[in-house]
Structures are given as C-alpha cells and as structure tokens.
Image (tube, rainbow, N blue to C red):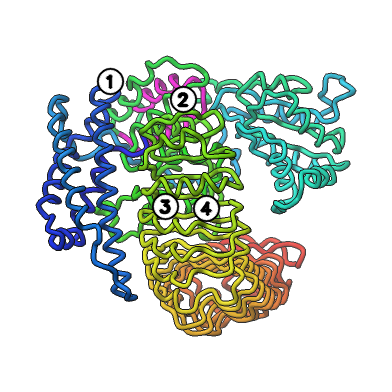
C-alpha cells in the first residue's frame, strides 16, 4: 500500500509536536483538542506496525486499517491548512497587505474536534485484534551495497551466460540466418524467457561487444515496453541513432523520411527491448520502415512472450534458459558475501544453497536475495529468508517472484512507501534522482532519523535511492554532475503496482471505475473529454500525473478545481497557452511540473500564493516571457528550473528565495545576467546554467551563495568571464564548465573553495590558454578533467602539491602538455601515461 498508517501517524505527530502548532493552539484556543488528538494518535501508532504485518490474514483488521487511514488523511489535510496559514502569515508580515488572521478559525476548531472524535471511536476498536506495541520494524535488514554506478553491464558481473552471448553474436555476424525467404529484408532474432532471466542483460553484453561494434555501421537501442506505438518508435530509433532530440513539430512523414535516410544502405543493429505487441500489422508497418538498410542488418527482440517471438522472427527463436545450479550458487556468493567471506561462514553457505534452489535459476531473484543477506552473519536472518512462508505460494511464470516480495517485506516502512509510489510511473521510465526525491518530498516521505538531523531532505532522499539500488530495486545507473538516472526492472515495477494497488492507479482507456481508496492518479492516455468515473473520485486525491502529451484542458481544469488537496501536479509536455488562475487555490501543492510546455507565455500571479510549493519545473517553456513579479513569496521553493525569453531573470526577487536548494537555467537565449542586483541565496547548493547564448556574466553585482556545492555551466557562447560581479562562495565541491568558447581564465573566487573543491571539469573552452597559478593550492581536488582545450599549452608549477589527487584526465589538448608532464617529477605518482599528441589522449591516474 502506498502509505502505511504507521508513517501517516508519524507525520501527524511531527506536526502536532512543532512549536508553530503549539503557538497556534494558544491563539485559537484549541490546545486541548490538539493535545487529545496527539495522545490518541500516539496510542494507535504504537500498535500499527504489528497491525500492518497481521492484516494479510485478518480481513477485519485490514478494514480497520483502511478506516483509520481515511481519518489520518483528513487529520493531515487539516493540519496542513494550519501550516499554510502559518506560512501565509509569515509572507504577509514580511511583505505587508496582511489579511485578517486565520479567516477560517471558526471552522478549524470544529474540524479538529470532529477528527478527534472519529479517531477516538476507531481507536476503541483496536483492542479486539490483540495487537502488540512495537516501536521499530522487525526483520529489517540494513546491509547496503553502494557500488552499482554503471550504465553498462560489466562482463565480470554476469555469470553463466558466455555460451548465450557467443551464440547470439554468431547469429548477428554470421551468414544469412533467414529461412531462405526472399521477402526477408532484415533478419530478426527474438530472445525469449521469463522475467528476471537476464534477456536485457544478454542483449547489452552483445550490444557492447567490441566485435559487434566494429561489425555494424550503426547500432541503436530502444525500450519498447507495453505500448507499441510505431510513430514513437520511429522517433526513439532516430534519437538513439543520431543522439539528437527530435523536433516535435515535424510530421510523421518527415520522421519516416529521416529514418529511411538514416538507415539507407547501412549495416545496422537494432535492439528492441521488452516487446509485448502481438499485432502483426503493427510489426509489419515498423519493419517496412527499416527496410532501407543493408541485407546484413540485424534486429534483436527481447520478450517474455513466445507469441510475440513468433510474430517477429525470421529464423529460429532463441530461448534463454534458467541458470545451472552451480552458476546460481556462484552468482549468489558474489552478491551475498564479501570476497572470500563464504569460506569463513560454511554454515551460512549451506543455508544459502537451499535459498538458491528456491530461486528456480532466475538471476534477478538470486541477486536480490544476495543483496538482502549481504554482510549478515547471524544464522537466524538467513533461516528467516530460507523458511519464509512466501515460498509456499503457488507460482506461475508471470507471477511476481517471491524473492522480490520477500526483499520488499524486509524493507523499513519509509522505504516501502517510497518504492510503492514509483508504480505511478510507466515501465521503462528513466527516473531522475532529483525529481524523484522532490516527488517523495512533496508527500513528506523523507524522514530524518536521530542520526541524520544534520542532513538536508535532499540528502535523505539520496540515501533512500542508494538503498533501493543496493537492494536491486533500481538498476542501469548513469551519472551526471548534479543528478543521476536509473530504471526499474519490469518485475520490480510489477511488484510496485501490486503493493500500491489500493491507493495508486494508472488510468488508461480500459478504466471505467475507480475505487474510493485511490489517492494517487497517473493518466496514460489522452481522453477527449472528462470521463464519467472522474466524478466518483474522492476530493482527497493527492497526486495527478499526466504521462501523455497535449493534455485535454478541460480535464486539467477539472483536476485543479476538484482535487483541492493535491500535493503533486505534473503537466509536463502540455500544450496549453494559459494556466488557470485557480491554480492558486491548491494551498497544499508542493510540486508543479510544467516542463516542456512550449506555448505557455505567462504564469498567473496566483501561483505565488502557493506558499507550500517546493518544486517548480519550467524547463523547456521556451515561450515563457517572465516569472511572476511576486515569485519571492514562494518561500518554501527548493527546486526551480526555468526557460524564459526575458533579458534579466531576477532583479530583487531571488534574494528572498531563502529555501532554494537547486536553480537550473536552461535555454534562456536572451538572458544577459542571472542576478541584476545584489542577491543572497543562503541555501542554494546547485546552480546549473545551460545554453544561454547571450549570457555575459553570472551576476552584475556581488551575489552570495555561501552553501553552493555544485556549479555547472554549459553552452554559453558569449560568456567571457566568470569574475565579473563576483560570486561569493566558500564551499564549492564540483565545478563543470563545458562549451564556453570565449572563456579565457578561471574565476579568482574559486580560490575561496580551496579546501572543498573535489571535482573540476573543463571542456570545449577553445580560448582557455592558461590554468591559474593557484590551482595547485586546491587541497581537496581529486578529479580534474580537461578536454578539448586546444590553446592550453602548459600546467601550472607545483602540481605535485595536489595531495588529494586520485585521477587526472587531459584529453585532446596541446601536445606540449604531454611533454611537460613527462619532465615533471609529480608525474612519477602516475600509474601510466598514454599518448602525447593531439589525436590521442593523455590520461594520468595517481
């Protein structure tokens, strides 16, 4: 279930315990009501972990929990209204125009009293279930693996698939594999197997093999998933083949023409991963568009369905089999033990052998349980996994693997609910760490433990993601400077759907009725009008995501007007020109995504009344003329990305966004300065400036960003200097400057981060001639990278003083640097130097 009653109770108690609520209770004379609500909630919370665990075998208890959650949600909504009024009062005190204090005070006392009475009535029924008070989750296994950080599949991580890889490569590179059919213009090999066997892993190994890369002129990879939309696939194939984004304004005919031109006479390899389509006509339509390539071209299709394989095949079907027991055991040992540790614990290894047998040769199951038991040496934990009753449930090929459910059951409650919310995103969705953390934050799912009080909420969210990575619930990680991306295996997504089904729902054309318990909606289709079932939905819906482009305005307006308790509203890639001013009535809203709306020109001023708003995404809103003049009133804003046509992004408003942690400026082609006046962004940690072609300087006046940790500047063609205006900072950890051709020197203010800067990346800065003399004073610098800076001829003296150096990369710079490095004594710390001319790379690792 998306949110556990235990965690909602925790959020209510946290609110009731805050100083703000204590002050409000005195002002409104409701302190006794709030104290009673707090006491009742605390008493119930003590037994909720036990209730959550026992409800699967007790229907009455399950119904009791559902009733309880309804009241908890009501309580949270009312307390959120109080919180909104606190913020409103803070804004009006700062900026004037104060309205009457708490206009709703006459209603508030009645609401809280009503909730307290309902809760007391439900609490009285708990004794019939003989629930045991528990303060913490039992059986929670906290072992972590944090080393899963690569997007590719290292061959060393794959066990027992050498023959499969060799056989598929033979098909791809061998003679014509078709059934002598003269109508076959490109040969297709389907790889078939149940979920979790490693079909995608094998395809990746083949795709990345050096022999395969050299054999084909062009390689492309597309995740197909459940929706086989030929037009979408054309765009995805083109994007994979060219690396460029597809112009959304082009018609289908032009897309098809570009695809044919891209493939014409080329020997290409196309991987279509995770195909479910059994409609032969759709397949024939797509295949006809791929007919312009060489006869030696190949298509690999991965699928769980033999029916799909029969539709697409031109030759034999390649059936992926389960791993042998020996290979399974080797894989399990790799993930469950540190190297050599299995020999120290022969008793655990014997239990592990029995666990492996239960995994029926499925690598995903083995890896998941190996992660679950990693670094655990108590036999009871291993026996708990081996003897768990979940293995006794009847299994079919399409069932969720018990190993995954078992791993889920051992998660702490906070991680369970974060995982369940991922069900709202489609299969093969590419998660962005920053946006997922903001999503969790909007629903108050990030809990600070006593040991993490010094952490920001964003840091807690990052810990959650890494914990889910360590449990193999996320995979395929790719890193960027200020975020990273990852995916979820289809079977893991199925598990998320299952555990969240009572509260989270993806709506499609087949949806006709919706249960009253649903609080989180994701629309995967474009309705022509507001569907009938919409009006049966509770007013308490808290999430509305639109997965489709060009949403129907009437449906969007209906969501805004009906769902007054929304915390998350995703309208990305929409096509409307005007956002309704009624958006300002969503006082609970914490995340609003308008990214990719190319037609919207202005935002209503009422948006500035969203005092709870933490995330506002406006990236790709290329027609947006400016931000609202009262942006400064959004005092809770932590995550802001912007594309706009204005010349000056901020004048004085930015000074007041004291909660801002991330600011991303993208494609603002007329922008000259970020800050036009003196500004203080006291808590800003990440600043990203990308593709602002007319940007002259970051700031026109001193701007203080004392907490800034990451600064990335990309594609600013007119940016000459970073020193103008001065950016005051002493905590920078990462600096990345890419494609800033007029930049000649690094900013002097960088010296103030000499004790903190760890990562420095400079690339495509053609006018950079020298690195500053003070560069060797950067005591914490671990990873300097310099690429494509042709005029850079030397490094500063004293590079041997970079005592924290771990890796230095200098690629495609002036050859004189290589000669200098050979002569320098500091290079003796290096393990190797490879290449010294401009056509190869110099790569030094300490």
- What residue did someone put label 4 on? 484
Question: Residue 400 — which label?
Answer: 2
Separation of residues labelled 4 and 3 (CA atoms): 10 Å
The numbered mark at residue 213 is none
In the picture of the structure, the residue carrying the numbered disc 1 is 57
Where is residue 362? Give x, y as percent.
51, 25
Task: Give the distance between the C-alpha atoms of the residues marked 3 and 1, in whole angstroms.
Answer: 35 Å
Crowdedness near tag 4: few (<14), some (14–19) or many (≥20) residues, C-alpha within 10 Å: some
Local packing at callout 2 (Cα closer than 10 Å; few below 14, some 14-19, many 20+) is some
Nearer the observer, disc 1 or disc 2? 1
Marks 1 and 2, how far apart at CA? 19 Å
**Quarter of the figure with residue 375:** top left
Quarter of the image that includes the C terminus: bottom right
The answer to whether residue 805 shows anywhere in this view is no
Residue at the image point whose x is 22% and y is 31% from the top: 50
Vertical placement of 656 versus 43: above or below? Answer: below
Which badge, 4 or 1, comes first in the chain's sequence? 1
Query: Does residue 356 show up magenta in the picture?
Result: yes
The region drawn magenta spans 348-377
**In this figure, which residue is indicated by the disc labeled 3?**
462
The N terminus appears in which quarter of the rendering? top left
Q: Position of residue 188 (x, y in %)?
A: 76, 28
| Pointer 3 with pointer 2, Cβ within 8 A | no
At x 21% / y 52%, what residue is drawn? 107
């Amino acid at each position: 279930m998306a949110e556990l009653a235990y965690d909602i109770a925790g959020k209510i108690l946290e609110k009731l315990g805050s100083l703000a609520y204590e002050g409000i209770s005195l002002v409104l004379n409701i302190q006794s009501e709030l104290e009673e609500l707090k006491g009742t909630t605390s008493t119930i919370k003590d037994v909720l972990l036990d209730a959550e665990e026992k409800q699967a075998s007790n229907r009455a208890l399950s119904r009791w929990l559902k009733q309880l959650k309804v009241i908890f949600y009501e309580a949270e909504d009312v307390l959120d209204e109080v919180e909104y009024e606190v913020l409103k009062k803070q804004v009006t005190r700062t900026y004037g125009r104060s309205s009457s204090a708490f206009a709703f005070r006459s209603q508030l006392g009645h609401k809280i009293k009503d909730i307290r009475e309902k809760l007391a009535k439900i609490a009285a029924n708990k004794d019939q279930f003989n629930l045991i008070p528990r303060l913490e989750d039992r059986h929670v296994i906290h072992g972590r693996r944090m080393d899963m950080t690569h997007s590719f599949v290292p061959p060393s991580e794959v066990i027992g698939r050498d023959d499969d890889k060799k056989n598929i490569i033979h098909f791809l590179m061998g003679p014509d594999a078709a059934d002598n059919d003269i109508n076959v213009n490109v040969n297709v090999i389907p790889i078939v197997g149940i979920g979790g066997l490693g079909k995608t892993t094998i395809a990746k190994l083949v795709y990345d093999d050096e022999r395969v890369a050299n054999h084909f002129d062009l390689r492309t990879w597309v995740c197909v998933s459940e929706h086989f939309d030929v037009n979408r696939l054309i765009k995805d194939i083109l994007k994979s083949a060219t690396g460029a984004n597809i112009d959304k304004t082009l018609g289908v005919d032009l897309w098809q023409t570009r695809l044919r031109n891209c493939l014409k006479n080329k020997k290409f390899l196309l991987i279509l991963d995770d195909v479910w389509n059994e409609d032969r006509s759709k397949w024939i339509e797509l295949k006809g568009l791929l007919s312009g390539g060489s006869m030696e071209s190949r298509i690999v299709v991965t699928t769980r369905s033999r029916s799909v394989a029969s539709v697409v095949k031109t030759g034999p079907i390649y059936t992926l089999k389960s791993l042998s027991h020996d290979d399974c055991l080797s894989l399990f040992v790799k993930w469950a033990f540190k190297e050599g540790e299995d020999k120290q614990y022969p008793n655990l290894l014997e239990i592990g052998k029995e666990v492996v047998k239960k995994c029926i040769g499925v690598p995903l199951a083995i890896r998941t349980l190996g992660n679950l038991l990693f670094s655990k040496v108590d036999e009871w934990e291993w026996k708990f996994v081996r003897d768990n009753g979940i293995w006794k449930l009847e299994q079919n090929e399409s069932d969720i693997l018990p190993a995954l459910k078992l791993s889920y059951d051992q998660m702490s409650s906070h991680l369970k609910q974060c995982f369940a919310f991922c069900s709202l995103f489609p299969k093969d969705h590419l998660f962005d760490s920053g946006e997922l953390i903001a999503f969790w934050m909007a629903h108050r799912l990030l809990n600070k433990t006593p040991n993490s009080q010094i952490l920001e909420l964003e840091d807690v969210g990052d810990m959650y993601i890494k914990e889910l990575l360590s449990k193999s619930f996320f995979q395929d990680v790719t890193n960027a400077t200020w975020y990273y991306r990852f995916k979820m295996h289809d079977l893991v997504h199925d598990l998320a759907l299952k555990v969240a089904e009572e509260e989270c729902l993806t709506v499609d054309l087949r949806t006709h009725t919706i249960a009253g318990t649903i609080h989180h909606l994701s629309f995967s289709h474009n309705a022509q009008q507001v569907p009938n079932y919409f009006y049966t939905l509770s007013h308490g819906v808290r999430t509305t995501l639109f997965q489709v482009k060009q949403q129907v305005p009437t449906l969007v307006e209906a969501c805004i007007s009906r769902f007054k308790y929304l915390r998350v509203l995703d309208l990305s890639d929409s096509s409307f020109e005007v956002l309704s001013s009624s958006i300002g009535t969503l006082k609970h809203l914490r995340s609003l995504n308008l990214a990719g709306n190319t037609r919207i020109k202005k935002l209503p001023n009422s948006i500035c009344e969203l005092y709870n708003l933490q995330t506002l995404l406006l990236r790709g809103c290329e027609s947006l003329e400016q931000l609202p003049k009262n942006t400064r009133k959004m005092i809770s804003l932590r995550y802001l990305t912007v594309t706009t046509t204005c010349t000056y992004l901020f004048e004085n408003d930015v000074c007041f966004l004291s909660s801002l942690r991330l600011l991303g400026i993208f494609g603002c082609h007329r922008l000259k300065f970020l800050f036009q006046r003196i500004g203080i962004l006291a808590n800003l940690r990440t600043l990203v400036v990308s593709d602002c072609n007319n940007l002259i300087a970051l700031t026109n006046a001193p701007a203080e960003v004392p907490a800034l940790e990451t600064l990335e500047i990309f594609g600013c063609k007119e940016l000459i200097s970073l020193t103008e205006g001065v950016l005051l900072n002493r905590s920078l950890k990462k600096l990345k400057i890419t494609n800033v051709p007029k930049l000649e020197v690094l900013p002097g203010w960088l010296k103030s981060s000499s004790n903190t800067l760890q990562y420095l990346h400079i690339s495509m800065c053609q006018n950079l001639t020298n690195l500053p003399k003070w560069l060797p004073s950067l005591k914490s610098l671990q990873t300097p990278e310099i690429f494509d800076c042709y005029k850079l001829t030397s490094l500063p003296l004293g590079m041997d003083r970079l005592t924290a150096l771990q890796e230095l990369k200098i690629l495609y710079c002036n050859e004189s640097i290589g000669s200098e490095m050979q002569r320098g004594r500091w290079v003796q710390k290096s393990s190797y130097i490879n290449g010294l001319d401009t056509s190869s790379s110099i790569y030094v690792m300490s």
